[in-house]
Image: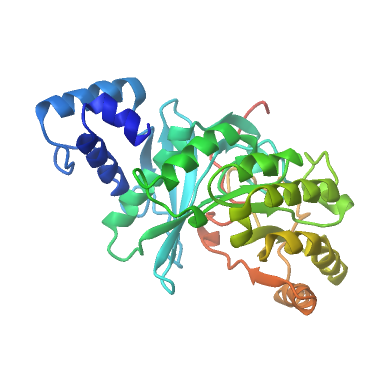
Amino acid sequence: MSIYELSLAMNGSGKAKRIWENLRSGIDPLDSTLSSLRGTRAIETLRKLNSEYSILDSSLLSTTLNHNDITISSCGTQKMLLSLKDGYKIESVLIPSYKFDRTTLCISTQIGCDRGCRFCATGKMGLIRNLQGHEIVSQVVQALKVVNEDPLMPPLLNVVFMGMGDAGQNIHEVSKAVEALTDNDRLKFAKSKCTLSTVGGSPSVFKELAECPGSLAWSLHSAVDEKRRRLVPSTRHTVVELREGLIEALKGRESLKSRTMMIACTLIAGINDGEDDAKALADFVQPIIEVAGKVALDIIPYNDIDREGDGLVAGDLGGEYRSPTEEAVKRFTDVLKERGCYVCVRVARGDNENSACGMLATERKKKRI
């Protein structure tokens, strides 16, 4: 609900603002011990609303704080397991940066994913269903609760739509969630601190995502069509066709030009980590750089999801995909830098607790949809 809609329902803007103040602190407004909402009539009105719409659409099953299922990595990254009203479970990841005094939350937009990326545990689940906007927002509120209760965790300032699912496949609900996140009357996140990621199901998906407040990220993985189709079997368009769609989206929204456009490439040993792959990527992004201003090539060394005892994906890849060596990553990034590209190498965060990029998965789907 917008602050206006909630004000009408609560018969007062002050009550509506207090509700969102509580949510920004990760507090359930109906929690009598913590909530700042006062007045019997106001609480009764909110309870009635809650019975119809539900304030928090997820319950926190495990983090490091409840010690039921310790999921903290040595670097401080925490994976949150959340249960939805219909019993399905999703995962979100809190990634603290003590150097920059901020925490980033990686949230899910779908239960499972239909993009089928061969190197991703979530893709192995298939698509179960899209998350609704309030279920997406609920992950953020639950994360705020975890952060605010942990004195060592830096403040939550960044939200990236890079968890389970593809934001581009659930644009309508993602749009509603981002509006709530970036609204100064609601969750108050900076628009530049919300990043929407997609593998690029079609050229038009970039334009649709660009209409949301926030920054864009494209999971490209390879600038060579043959290799990209191997890695992302759901691909129906060439990389050039997708690039043209992205360029048109960037041209159509001036504010995107002042923000960093992220292009992600997961490096897999012997598949797309060669110097020729790096040269192809450097050449491919030049037309995007001309429009976007600043493009960050986010290089992600593959996180091995083919692990013994995983229970979800062990053995599925048959040993086909492996992490690149440090030397290969350096050679790859050196080529990009020599050609004038801005490069950042993703440091694996939470990989020892299956919280890193491409490692999120909850339960299998018997039949893909």
Q: How is the image coloured?
A: rainbow
Residue at image location 35% in from the left, 61% down from the top: 155
Q: How many marks overall?
A: 0
Write down the quadrant of residue 116 in the picture: top right
- Quadrant of image for the C terminus: top right
- Residue 325's place in the image compared with 257, above or below, is below
Position of 320 with respect to 196 (left or right) is: right
Q: Where is residue 331 shown, x and y percent of the image?
A: 78, 77
Q: Foreground residue, 84 or 20?
A: 20
Name the quarter where the N terminus is drawn. Answer: top left
Q: Nearer the viewer, residue 344 or 311?
A: 344
Residue drawn at 10 percent across, 31 percent down: 39
Q: Is residue 334 visible?
A: yes
Task: Identify which residue, 289 or 172, lies in the foreground.
Answer: 289
Q: Position of residue 138 (x, y in %)?
A: 40, 39
Q: Nearer the viewer, residue 183 or 39?
A: 183
Q: Is residue 191 above or below residue 237?
A: below
Left or right? Give the position of 325 relative to 46.
right
- x and y, in percent, of residue 84 in the image: 43, 32
The answer to whether any part of residue 272 appears in the image is no
Q: Is residue 107 left or right of residue 254?
A: left
Percent across and percent down for residue 230 are 83, 48
Residue drawn 35% across and 43% down? Answer: 186
